[in-house]
Image (cartoon, rainbow, N blue to C red):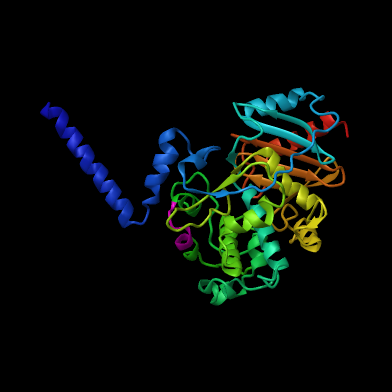
Amino acid sequence: MKYVKKPVKWLLILLGLTIAILYITDTDYLIKAVRTIYMRGYTTAFLDDYKRFDNQVISNGTSQSWPNHVDYNIAQETDALKKTNSEYGTVAYLIIKNDSIWFENYYDGFGPDSQSNSFSIAKSYVSGLMGKAIMEGHIKSLDQPVCDFLPKFCEGKAAKLTVGDLSSMASGTNWDEAYYSPLSITTRAYFDDDLEKVMLGLEVIDEPGQKFKYASGDTQMLAMVIEKATGKKLYEYLTESFWKPLGSENPTLWQLDSKEHDLVKAYCCIASNARDFARFGKLYKDHGKWYGQQLLDSAFVAKSLRPRFPESPQYGYGFWLKEQLGKQFFMMRGHLGQYVIVQPDDNVIIVRLGHQKSPDAGIGKFTEDISIYIEEAYKMLAL
């Protein structure tokens, strides 16, 4: 027995030393990462990991159900779409035509009301909340300095940083968008229980407002600006600005850094479903108007759906932009292949949620699966 006790003793000592080192080096967030992700066999965040974090509830009001199209679910998935859905673990695939559900299918035990992690789809909501804050006079314009709200960014190049730079991913900060490295700031932001501290440690190293560089930290900083400007928690502002007015059918969750600090992970992590995610795509398709009510300024919406930088035509303000089939699409897009894809001229919205996407083409580039979800939907629609 003593031969067994000795290795266990040294193992416990080693574990204790490891934990002590993590706290001393300010990398103790890795304990949470190991517990919630890595010990469960994942190498990155996964679709229903929101259940293992603190969340705030986003309440819904009077729900407005999507009507079913007269041709609801008459069409069948193409063979290519079936293959792709199976290969990448799709859990929801939805086509809305003329504001009616034309086709929907769910997989892997998911259904119309099942929640799953939005990941970076949330960025579009945060940009929309910025537009709402401008519309309501809490923020002067896209050109208002971030310094007016976050004094940490008042010196040197940071003094030139604007709220519009944050929404268009042009902050010039030293944020490193690395999902699979446990030591990256992206991983720290996901697991640290004090996200504001993480964000205030960023430095502006390049001239802001000059070029697109995809950085989740830009959206997180924008969320902090909106909270300062409005005096409201972001989950409260989302509830009153969009979730209730858009007639969402279900309440949802927005993941927090911790109950203690109560800051949403604004760059990601709204747990909802395909039907309710589609509502925000419809709002932008309809120039900020929802059944007669102007929830967002139409000029702001139009600006959001155009590239800010000619050399980066794939991004506007909080939305991705893609040409496919000779048509212009705008998109809400998240990690592992969460998509709300909109073609305004055809009045089509495509939503895909799932466990994986096709292999990465690089940060800020489109993966092959996106083209498949669009093209196969159009074959089904025969447009």
Nearest the viewer among 172 and 277 is 277
Residue projecting furthest to the left: 2
Q: What residue sits 53% from the left and 53% below the top?
A: 265
* Residue 379 relative to residue 214: left or right: right
- Magenta stretch: give its range: 192-198
| Corner quadrant of residue 372 | top right
Nearest the viewer among 286 and 10 is 286
Residue projecting furthest to the bottom: 155
* Residue 348 relative to residue 239: left or right: right
Residue 174 at least partly seen: yes
Q: Quick check: is 286 in the magenta stretch?
A: no
Task: Classify the position of the N terminus by image quarter.
Answer: top left
Q: Position of residue 16 (x, y in %)?
A: 25, 45
Q: What residue sits 65% from the left and 36% below the top?
A: 353
Q: Position of residue 83 (x, y in %)?
A: 69, 24
Q: What residue sits 60% from the left and 26% below the top?
A: 108
Q: Position of residue 304 (x, y in %)?
A: 75, 58
| Count of marks overlaid on the render | 0
| Relative to 98, residue 264 above or below | below
Task: Classify the position of the C terminus by image quarter.
Answer: top right
* Residue 277 relative to residue 377: left or right: left
Q: Quick check: is 194 in the magenta stretch?
A: yes
Residue 358 at least partly seen: no
Q: Position of residue 376 (x, y in %)?
A: 78, 31
| Corner quadrant of residue 367 | top right
